[in-house]
Image (cartoon, rainbow, N blue to C red):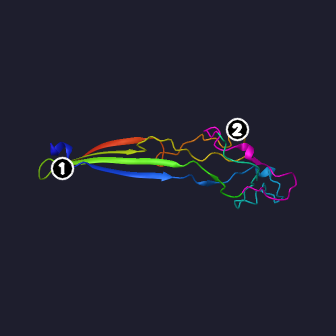
Amino acid sequence: MNGALGGWNFSTVTLLQTGQWLTPTMNPVDDQSNTDLNNERYLGGAVARPDCVGNPVPSNRSREAYYALSAFGAPPVNAGRFGTCGLGILQGPGEINVNAGLAKQFLLNEHYRLRFEATFTNVLNHTNFAPPALNISNPSTFGVLDATLPQGLGGNRTGQVALRLDF
């Protein structure tokens, strides 16, 4: 009885993580800072930011509206300033990922051992979303959770089973 039911090894790695900090942006053509962000010479990472005018978290948050577009607006024409939204003011979707393994070694004789192993990624098959698009110049994609994380980084569940003979 102990040969079949005893000696199993169970392992798990669990990741519970809040979302990364994100920054709303806008098309550089619409930038009112008068700093010529649309010029190809400025590839140093400057980003046109909108004005914050409301609460970015909608009352009925969903995949289609993770953030409220109405909370952001372009600075007034010829404002001569960047938008009032700061860097990293939005928190992206979090991640829940549980990976697990089950293994047992069977002694066949003094020279041979058989090892059974089963491992699974994202055992709970929890959907972990990639950060949404945050460019207010594209209202149809702004704040929409339309992509999941790739395999190995919290993507869909996978599993493998293996038998190994050691001699």
Q: Give the Cα separation between the discs numbered 2 and 1.
A: 59 Å
Reading the image, the residue beneath label 1 is: 113
| In magenta segment, residue 146 | no
The image quadrant of residue 119 is top left
What residue does disc 2 label? 140
- Judging depth in this view, the residue of 34 and 75 nearest the camera is 75
Task: Name the front one of labels 2 and 1.
Answer: 2
Screen quadrant of the N terminus: top left
Q: Name the residue nearer the viewer: 26 or 72.
A: 72
Stretch in magenta: 60-85
Across and down, in percent, residue 28 comes to: 77, 52
Q: Is residue 132 left or right of residue 82?
A: left
Of all residues shown, which one is farthest toward the right? 78
Q: How many marks overall?
A: 2
User: Which callout, 2 or 1, points at the residue further toward the start of the chain?
Assistant: 1
**Residue 137 visible in the shown view:** no
